[in-house]
Image (tube, rainbow, N blue to C red):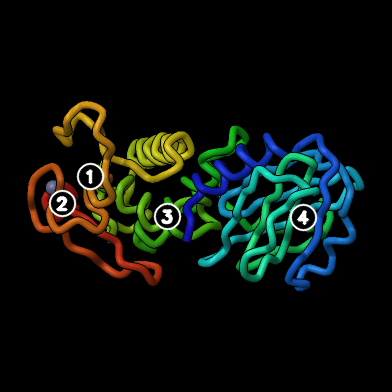
Amino acid sequence: MPEGHTLHRIARDHGRLLVGRAVTVSSPQGRFADAILVDGQRLDRLEAYGKHLFYTWSNGLVGHVHLGLFGKYRVSRHGDEEAPEPRGAVRMRLSTPDVTIDLAGPTDCSIGDESDRDRIVARLGPDPLRRDARPQAAFDRIARSRQPIGALLLDQSVMCGVGNVYRAEALFVNGIRPTRLGRDLDPAELEALWSTIVAMLKQGVKDNRIITVDRRELDLPRGRRIRRGEATYAYKRDRCLRCGTPIESVELAGRPCYYCPTCQPT
Ligand SMILES: [Zn+2]
């Protein structure tokens, strides 16, 4: 499942192509019949909130997309006139004279209004990538909880956008064992954890992939791209990048959370 940086990157990139334009909206596959409600409207805003995308149209309607596990966008620089044949089951096609964006396989692709958007957002904790995020709401939830911090970080109602890679890596950088209970973290640790998550997700938006390691710790030749499997300290590694201890994992919120027993002693 994509983490929050992917959705914010999509909002930014697709927003540049579509916002302020009249957009042809269709459903080549046919399962998004409500496309007709916004077809030809101007897109006023495209925003990400956690793992959700919201399209605000000039007639006041708001589209919602959640990619889930399998959702994918495909961007083609061919506009309406010479748009490519839809590949696979394209749920939603957005096109202008310059560009065609196809969406396939999302968990949700629907049209509602502002109140539907607000209802979804109300269920989410603060999004570390949004300027309007209020982390105190997340700190309060965590400070009261008997759940392990590793589970809380994946709970989108505590904070939203963190997935399996960032949770492991943010806890690693802060030396926190994922099984520590939320209420056992002190305020300074929560602040530090939040700052790490903000920085990592922002870097992810910039790189358009997840790299949590500091390049200087890798001893790579200059300019050589960081390969998959080199980009994390603990996540899916055999041994800790910093100390060489074998990495362990514990199942939290249904997914394995990787950690270094030496660097994350408690
Ligand atoms: Zn270590």
Mark 3 surroundings within 10 Å by alpha-carbon count, few (fewer than 14), some (14 through 19), many (20 or more): many
Q: Determine the residue positioned at 64% across, 48% down.
A: 76
Q: Quadrant of residue 91?
A: bottom right
Residue behind mark 1: 175
Label 4: which residue? 63
Residue 69 image offset from top left, x and y in percent: 51, 66
- Front label number (3 vs 4): 4
Residue 118: tell me if it is visible: no
Residue drawn at point x = 31 percent, y = 41 percent = 212
Would you name the residue on which mark 2 appears? Answer: 265
Query: Which residue type carries mark 4?
Result: Gly
Q: Position of residue 152 (x, y in %)?
A: 42, 58
Of labels 4 and 1, earlier in sequence is 4
Q: Residues within 10 Å of mark 4 (few under 14, many from 20)?
A: many
Name the spot of residue 223 as percent of width and height, x first.
26, 28
In three-dimensional space, the C-alpha distance between marks 3 and 4, rounded to whole angstroms, equals: 27 Å
Position of 143 with respect to 42 (left or right) is left
Q: Nearer the viewer, residue 99 or 32?
A: 99
Which numbered tag is attached to residue 48? none
Between discs 1 and 3, the one toward the N terminus: 3
- Quote the CA–CA distance across marks 1 and 2: 7 Å
User: How far is disc 1 from disc 3 in space, using C-alphas?
Assistant: 15 Å
Question: Of circles 4 and 1, which is in front?
Answer: 4
Q: Secondary structure at mark 3?
A: loop
> Dot 4: what SS?
strand
- Label 3 sits on residue: 153
* C-alpha span from label 4 to label 1: 40 Å
What secondary structure is found at the residue carrying circle 1?
A: loop
Q: Nearer the viewer, residue 12 or 240?
A: 12
